[in-house]
Image (cartoon, grey):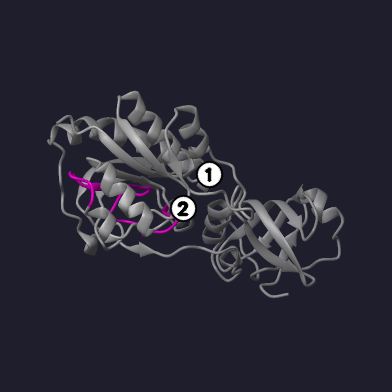
Amino acid sequence: MNNNRLVVCAYHNVGYRCIRELLRQGAEITLIFTHEDSPGEQIWFASVRELAELNGIPFITSDINEPENVERLRVIAPDFIFSFYYRTMIKPQVLEIPRLGALNLHGSYLPKYRGRVPVNWAVINGETETGATLHYMVAKPDAGDIVDQEKATIEFSDTAHDVFAKVTDAAVTVISRAWPLLRAGRASRIPMDLKAGNYCGGRKAADGLIDWEKSAVQIYNLIRGVTHPYPGAFTYLDGQKVLIWSAWPREGSGQPGVILAHTPLLVGTGAGVLEVRSLQGEGGQEQPAQEFISNHQQITSFQENP
C-alpha cells in the first residue's frame, strides 16, 4: 500500500496552503470538505473551494459528521483524514474511519492555546511566540499525540493578521516535513501534556470592548489582536461607539480613559498612556487620530459604556 489516499477538511489560508503542499508532494486527495463563506464575515483569505475546483477535486460543504457523509467516507476508505482550519468538530465515528489516523493542524505551539482563535489570543495576551502543530485527533479537542510543530515569532509591532501569516508559513513547513514520514510510518507520536498548556474559547465582536483600567500595553495588545481584518477594539464617546484600529503604548500617566492631549491623541490608562493613531466613529470611515479629533475638540474622555 502507498498510504497516499486522503480526505481533507479545510478552510482559510492554512487549509489552502496545506492542500497545495500535499498536492505538490503527490498526495491523492479524493475528497475535500470545506465551508460556505458566511455572509456576515469579512472574507480576506484564500478559497479552498476554488482550489478544489482548480485541481478537479470533489468537494462538499455540508457537515462531515452527517450520516450520508460518514457513509461516503467509509466507501472511500482513506488512509488519512487531515483537518486544516476546518470549523466543525469532527466526531469520533469519523475519526475511526481512516486506516492510519486523522490529524489536525492547529495554529499554536501546543499544548499552549488549545481551542479557538489561538492566534488572536496569543497576540492579545502579549506572547512573543506561537506556532503550528500537527497532531492526531481524538474526542477531546487539540489533545492527541503531536507529530510535528514549528514555532513562529510574535514581534511587539505585529498584528494578529501579521502573526496569522507567519503561522500559515509554519503550518506549510510542518506538513512538508511530516507528510513523507506519515506515509512511511515513521512519524513521531509525542503524547500531549495538557497540564503544560491552556484552552481558549472563541471570541465575539463584543469582546473587543476596551477596559481603560488596564495598562496601556494590555489595551494595545487587544487592539492589535483584533484590528483589521477582525472586528476591532472599541470604546464609547458621548454615547457613540468608536473603533480604535491602531495605537501605541507610551510612558506617562493619566486617569483611565481621560484624553490628555490631542496632538498626538494621548489617553490615560491604568498604567501608562496610550497613543491612539486611527479611529472610526459609528457609521463613519476610519480616520487618522488628528483628523478625527479635529471634529471632536470638545471631548474629554472615552467611556466603557454608551
Q: Amino acid at mark 1?
A: His
From the viewer's perspective, is residue 190 above or below residue 169?
below
Give me the C-alpha separation between circle 1 and circle 2.
28 Å
Q: Quadrant of the C terminus?
A: bottom right
Q: Which mark is residue 62?
A: 2
Residue 296: in magenta span: no
Predominant SS along the magenta part: loop
Q: Which mark is residue 161?
A: 1
Q: Is residue 14 left or right of residue 37?
A: left
| Residue at 33% across, 31% down | 22
Residue 109 painted magenta: yes
Whether residue 70 is visible here, answered yes or no, is: yes
Q: Picture quarter containing residue 268?
A: bottom right
Q: Residue at x 44, y 27 (%)?
A: 55
The span shown in magenta is 97-118
Q: Quadrant of residue 68?
A: bottom left
Left or right, 167 with respect to 94, comes to right
